[in-house]
Image: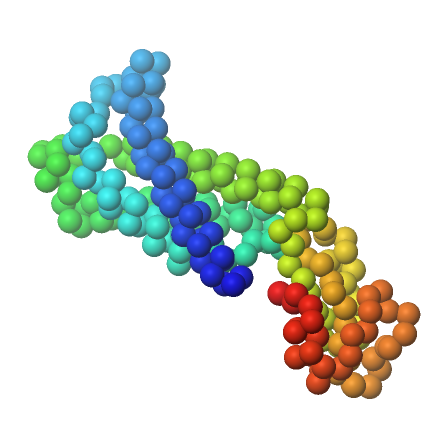
Amino acid sequence: MLKERARILAVVLLAIDLALTAAAFFCAYWLRNVLFPELEWVPGRLYPLHTYLPLLGLVLLIWGTLLVATGQYRSHRTVPILEEAWGILRVCFSGAVVFTLTIYALRLDEALLRDDKISRLWILLFAVCSFLFLLSEKVALRITSRYVRTRGFNYRTVLLVGANPAAFTMVRAIDSHGYWGFRVLGFVSTGAEGERTDNLPYPLLGSVDDIPRIVERNVVD
Protein backbone atom coordinates (compact mmCIF):
# COMPACT_ATOMS: atom_id res chain seq x y z
CA MET A 1 0.00 0.00 0.00
CA LEU A 2 2.74 2.45 0.95
CA LYS A 3 4.76 1.59 -2.15
CA GLU A 4 1.69 2.07 -4.35
CA ARG A 5 0.98 5.47 -2.81
CA ALA A 6 4.66 6.40 -3.15
CA ARG A 7 4.61 5.50 -6.86
CA ILE A 8 1.46 7.55 -7.47
CA LEU A 9 2.92 10.50 -5.62
CA ALA A 10 6.17 10.22 -7.59
CA VAL A 11 4.26 10.30 -10.89
CA VAL A 12 2.24 13.34 -9.77
CA LEU A 13 5.38 15.18 -8.65
CA LEU A 14 7.14 14.34 -11.90
CA ALA A 15 4.20 15.75 -13.86
CA ILE A 16 4.32 18.95 -11.78
CA ASP A 17 8.08 19.23 -12.26
CA LEU A 18 7.75 18.84 -16.03
CA ALA A 19 5.00 21.46 -16.09
CA LEU A 20 7.28 23.86 -14.20
CA THR A 21 10.12 23.03 -16.59
CA ALA A 22 7.86 23.92 -19.52
CA ALA A 23 6.92 27.16 -17.74
CA ALA A 24 10.62 27.95 -17.32
CA PHE A 25 11.09 27.34 -21.07
CA PHE A 26 8.52 30.03 -21.90
CA CYS A 27 9.66 32.37 -19.13
CA ALA A 28 13.24 32.30 -20.42
CA TYR A 29 11.96 33.09 -23.91
CA TRP A 30 10.01 36.08 -22.59
CA LEU A 31 13.01 37.37 -20.62
CA ARG A 32 15.38 37.10 -23.58
CA ASN A 33 12.95 38.20 -26.26
CA VAL A 34 10.92 40.90 -24.48
CA LEU A 35 12.28 42.14 -21.16
CA PHE A 36 16.01 42.23 -21.81
CA PRO A 37 15.73 44.02 -25.18
CA GLU A 38 13.31 46.57 -23.68
CA LEU A 39 15.79 47.25 -20.89
CA GLU A 40 18.53 47.44 -23.54
CA TRP A 41 20.52 44.74 -21.79
CA VAL A 42 20.91 42.74 -25.01
CA PRO A 43 20.56 43.71 -28.67
CA GLY A 44 17.94 42.20 -30.92
CA ARG A 45 15.18 39.71 -30.32
CA LEU A 46 14.67 35.99 -30.82
CA TYR A 47 12.78 34.28 -33.61
CA PRO A 48 9.01 33.75 -33.08
CA LEU A 49 8.14 31.38 -30.25
CA HIS A 50 6.76 28.67 -32.53
CA THR A 51 10.28 28.30 -33.99
CA TYR A 52 11.54 27.00 -30.64
CA LEU A 53 8.56 24.83 -29.70
CA PRO A 54 10.03 21.64 -31.27
CA LEU A 55 12.79 21.88 -28.64
CA LEU A 56 10.30 21.66 -25.76
CA GLY A 57 9.86 17.90 -26.17
CA LEU A 58 13.63 17.42 -26.04
CA VAL A 59 13.83 19.59 -22.92
CA LEU A 60 11.15 17.60 -21.11
CA LEU A 61 12.81 14.32 -22.05
CA ILE A 62 16.21 15.45 -20.72
CA TRP A 63 14.87 17.03 -17.53
CA GLY A 64 12.51 14.14 -16.80
CA THR A 65 15.29 11.59 -17.25
CA LEU A 66 17.68 13.50 -15.00
CA LEU A 67 15.07 14.09 -12.29
CA VAL A 68 14.25 10.38 -12.11
CA ALA A 69 17.87 9.20 -12.47
CA THR A 70 19.12 11.42 -9.62
CA GLY A 71 16.55 10.10 -7.16
CA GLN A 72 14.48 13.26 -6.79
CA TYR A 73 11.34 11.22 -6.08
CA ARG A 74 12.59 9.06 -3.22
CA SER A 75 11.55 9.99 0.31
CA HIS A 76 13.08 13.30 1.40
CA ARG A 77 11.84 13.22 5.00
CA THR A 78 15.34 13.28 6.45
CA VAL A 79 17.20 14.96 3.56
CA PRO A 80 18.54 18.47 4.40
CA ILE A 81 17.12 21.26 2.24
CA LEU A 82 20.59 22.27 1.02
CA GLU A 83 21.20 18.73 -0.23
CA GLU A 84 17.90 18.79 -2.10
CA ALA A 85 18.69 22.24 -3.55
CA TRP A 86 22.09 20.97 -4.71
CA GLY A 87 20.41 18.03 -6.41
CA ILE A 88 18.02 20.33 -8.29
CA LEU A 89 20.93 22.60 -9.28
CA ARG A 90 22.84 19.64 -10.73
CA VAL A 91 19.77 18.50 -12.67
CA CYS A 92 19.13 21.92 -14.21
CA PHE A 93 22.65 22.77 -15.24
CA SER A 94 23.55 19.25 -16.31
CA GLY A 95 20.36 19.33 -18.34
CA ALA A 96 21.41 22.62 -19.93
CA VAL A 97 24.76 21.11 -20.92
CA VAL A 98 23.15 17.98 -22.39
CA PHE A 99 20.53 20.15 -24.14
CA THR A 100 23.21 22.36 -25.71
CA LEU A 101 25.36 19.43 -26.81
CA THR A 102 22.34 17.68 -28.32
CA ILE A 103 21.39 20.81 -30.27
CA TYR A 104 24.82 21.09 -31.83
CA ALA A 105 25.37 17.35 -32.29
CA LEU A 106 22.09 16.97 -34.17
CA ARG A 107 22.40 20.41 -35.82
CA LEU A 108 18.96 21.36 -34.58
CA ASP A 109 19.82 25.05 -34.79
CA GLU A 110 20.39 24.69 -38.53
CA ALA A 111 17.12 22.80 -38.91
CA LEU A 112 15.14 25.43 -36.99
CA LEU A 113 16.98 28.69 -37.67
CA ARG A 114 18.79 27.90 -40.91
CA ASP A 115 22.05 29.88 -40.82
CA ASP A 116 21.58 31.24 -37.30
CA LYS A 117 22.45 29.79 -33.88
CA ILE A 118 20.16 29.22 -30.91
CA SER A 119 20.78 31.86 -28.26
CA ARG A 120 23.14 30.63 -25.54
CA LEU A 121 21.78 33.34 -23.23
CA TRP A 122 18.29 31.90 -23.67
CA ILE A 123 19.54 28.43 -22.72
CA LEU A 124 21.29 29.86 -19.65
CA LEU A 125 18.16 31.78 -18.65
CA PHE A 126 16.14 28.61 -19.08
CA ALA A 127 18.48 26.69 -16.75
CA VAL A 128 18.25 29.45 -14.14
CA CYS A 129 14.45 29.70 -14.41
CA SER A 130 13.99 25.94 -14.20
CA PHE A 131 16.19 25.83 -11.10
CA LEU A 132 14.26 28.65 -9.40
CA PHE A 133 10.86 27.18 -10.32
CA LEU A 134 11.72 23.64 -9.21
CA LEU A 135 13.44 24.79 -6.03
CA SER A 136 10.47 26.97 -5.10
CA GLU A 137 8.17 23.99 -5.56
CA LYS A 138 10.39 21.74 -3.41
CA VAL A 139 10.60 24.33 -0.63
CA ALA A 140 6.82 24.84 -0.70
CA LEU A 141 6.23 21.08 -0.56
CA ARG A 142 8.72 20.69 2.27
CA ILE A 143 7.16 23.48 4.34
CA THR A 144 3.66 22.07 3.78
CA SER A 145 4.61 18.46 4.51
CA ARG A 146 6.55 19.41 7.64
CA TYR A 147 3.62 21.45 8.90
CA VAL A 148 1.30 18.50 8.33
CA ARG A 149 3.66 16.04 10.05
CA THR A 150 4.18 18.21 13.11
CA ARG A 151 0.39 18.21 13.49
CA GLY A 152 0.41 14.40 13.70
CA PHE A 153 -0.64 13.58 10.14
CA ASN A 154 1.10 11.67 7.35
CA TYR A 155 3.43 9.87 9.73
CA ARG A 156 5.18 6.49 9.43
CA THR A 157 5.19 4.01 12.33
CA VAL A 158 8.61 2.64 13.26
CA LEU A 159 9.43 -0.61 15.07
CA LEU A 160 12.99 -0.66 16.41
CA VAL A 161 14.76 -4.03 16.41
CA GLY A 162 17.28 -4.09 19.25
CA ALA A 163 17.20 -2.18 22.54
CA ASN A 164 20.79 -1.01 22.35
CA PRO A 165 22.65 2.34 22.33
CA ALA A 166 22.34 2.68 18.56
CA ALA A 167 18.55 2.31 18.83
CA PHE A 168 18.39 4.89 21.62
CA THR A 169 20.37 7.33 19.45
CA MET A 170 17.86 6.78 16.67
CA VAL A 171 14.96 7.36 19.07
CA ARG A 172 16.45 10.66 20.20
CA ALA A 173 16.89 11.74 16.57
CA ILE A 174 13.28 10.83 15.72
CA ASP A 175 11.87 12.52 18.81
CA SER A 176 13.83 15.72 18.17
CA HIS A 177 12.78 15.92 14.51
CA GLY A 178 9.01 15.74 14.61
CA TYR A 179 8.78 17.11 11.06
CA TRP A 180 10.32 13.87 9.76
CA GLY A 181 6.96 12.26 10.39
CA PHE A 182 8.13 9.10 12.19
CA ARG A 183 6.35 7.68 15.23
CA VAL A 184 8.06 5.00 17.31
CA LEU A 185 5.77 2.10 18.21
CA GLY A 186 8.28 0.33 20.44
CA PHE A 187 11.23 -2.05 20.62
CA VAL A 188 11.72 -5.73 19.99
CA SER A 189 14.60 -7.53 21.63
CA THR A 190 17.18 -9.49 19.66
CA GLY A 191 18.48 -11.23 22.78
CA ALA A 192 21.95 -9.80 22.24
CA GLU A 193 24.21 -9.17 25.20
CA GLY A 194 23.98 -5.65 26.59
CA GLU A 195 20.38 -4.98 25.57
CA ARG A 196 18.16 -3.18 28.04
CA THR A 197 14.73 -4.49 28.99
CA ASP A 198 13.66 -1.83 31.52
CA ASN A 199 13.43 1.97 31.68
CA LEU A 200 13.03 2.13 27.91
CA PRO A 201 11.65 5.30 26.29
CA TYR A 202 9.08 3.16 24.45
CA PRO A 203 7.47 -0.23 25.24
CA LEU A 204 9.33 -3.49 24.74
CA LEU A 205 6.84 -5.39 22.58
CA GLY A 206 8.58 -8.73 22.49
CA SER A 207 11.43 -10.48 20.73
CA VAL A 208 12.34 -10.90 17.08
CA ASP A 209 10.22 -14.07 17.00
CA ASP A 210 7.19 -11.96 17.95
CA ILE A 211 7.47 -9.61 14.94
CA PRO A 212 4.76 -11.42 12.89
CA ARG A 213 2.33 -11.10 15.83
CA ILE A 214 3.27 -7.45 16.39
CA VAL A 215 2.79 -6.61 12.72
CA GLU A 216 -0.58 -8.36 12.66
CA ARG A 217 -1.85 -6.40 15.66
CA ASN A 218 -0.32 -3.01 14.85
CA VAL A 219 0.26 -0.77 11.87
CA VAL A 220 4.01 -0.95 11.22
CA ASP A 221 5.33 0.96 8.24
The residue drawn where x is 62% and y is 65% is 221
Compared to residue 95, the image places residue 208 above or below, namely: below
Q: Is residue 81 above or below residue 35?
A: below
Q: Is residue 143 above or below residue 45?
A: below
Residue closer to the observer: 206 or 126: 206
> What is the residue that sits farthest to the right in this orientation?
199
Q: Locate residue 65, reporting x and y percent.
A: 34, 54
Residue at 41 percent of width and 42 percent of height:
16
Occupied quadrant, residue 22:
top left
On the question of residue 40 being in view, the answer is no
Please state if 96 lies on the left or on the right of 85 as rendered. Answer: left
Q: Is residue 9 visible?
A: yes
Reply above or below: 4 against 114. below
Relative placement, left or right, of 168 versus 109 is: right
Which quadrant of the structure image shows residue 51? top left
- At 36% across and 39% down in the image, what residue appears? 19
List x then y, in percent, for residue 177: 72, 52
x 24%, y 44%: residue: 57
Q: How many marks?
A: 0
* Side of 159 where 21 appears, left or right: left
Image coordinates for residue 143, horizontal then vertical, percent: 61, 40
Horizontal arrangement in the rendering, residue 73 relative to residue 44 (left or right): right
The percent position of residue 91, horizontal first and vertical second, equals 41, 49
